[in-house]
Image (spheres, helix red, strand yellow):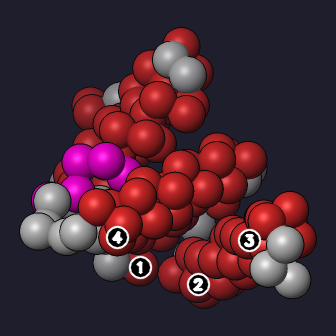
Amino acid sequence: RHASEMREGESVLPWLIRVVVNRAITVARKRSREQLVARVLWSAPKHEIDPEEEAVAGELRALVTREVHKLSESDRAVLVLHYFLDQDLETMAATLGCSTGSIKARLFRARTRLRGRLQASTSSMAVVSGEA
C-alpha cells in the first residue's frame, strides 16, 4: 500500500513498520542471514562476567543464532518483532496483516519450534561431549 491510500484517522505506525519490515527483509536477503542475527544477538550490553561465563554465553549466542537462522521467515519475523523490537500484539498484527489471535498462535508455534531445535542441539552436543 502507498501512503496516499491511508484512510483518515488510520494509524500510520503499523503501515510504517510494515514498510520497514519489508525493506529489512529485502536487505537481509542480500546479506547473510547469519550476519544479521549475529549482529542483533551480539549488540546486547556487556556485563562484567568471568571468562568461563563469557565463553558459555558466546557458545549459547552462536547456538541460538544458528537455530534462529534455520527457522522459517514467518517464525523469525514474529520472534524479532516481539523480542527484539518489543512490539505489542496489536502492533504486530497490524504490521503483519493478521489478527492478534493469529499472532499469539504464530508466537506460540515459533517459540515451540525454536525450543525444540535448541533442545535437540543441546542434547546432541551432550552426546558428542560424552555428558549424556
Dot 2 amino acid type: Lys
Q: Are marks 2 and 1 in contact (CB under 8 Å)?
A: yes
Q: For numbered disc 1, what is the local secondary structure? A: helix
Q: CA distance from mark 3 to mark 2?
A: 27 Å
| Point 26% across, 31% down: residue | 4
Residue 111 against residue 10 in the figure, above or below: below
Q: Which residues are magenta?
A: 41-45
Q: Percent position (x, y) of residue 15?
A: 33, 47
Q: In front: mark 3 or mark 4? A: 4
Q: So how many labels did they put on this image? A: 4
Q: Which mark is residue 122?
A: 3
Q: CA distance from mark 4 to mark 2?
A: 34 Å
Q: Are marks 4 and 2 in contact (CB under 8 Å)?
A: no
**Left or right for 113, reference 45:** right
Tell which of 6 and 22 is nearer to you. 22
Q: Percent position (x, y) of residue 93?
A: 48, 69
Q: In front: mark 1 or mark 3? A: 3
Which badge, 3 or 2, is on the more N-terminal residue?
2
Tag 1 residue? 89
**Left or right for 47, reference 76:** left
Looking at the rendered image, the quarter that the C terminus falls into is: bottom right
Q: In front: mark 4 or mark 1? A: 4
Tag 2 residue? 104
Residue 131 against residue 14 in the figure, above or below: below
Residue 113 appears anywhere in the view: no
Dot 4 amino acid type: Glu
Which badge, 2 or 1, is on the more N-terminal residue?
1
| Badge 1 density bin: few <14, some 14–19, many ≥20, Cα 10 Å | some
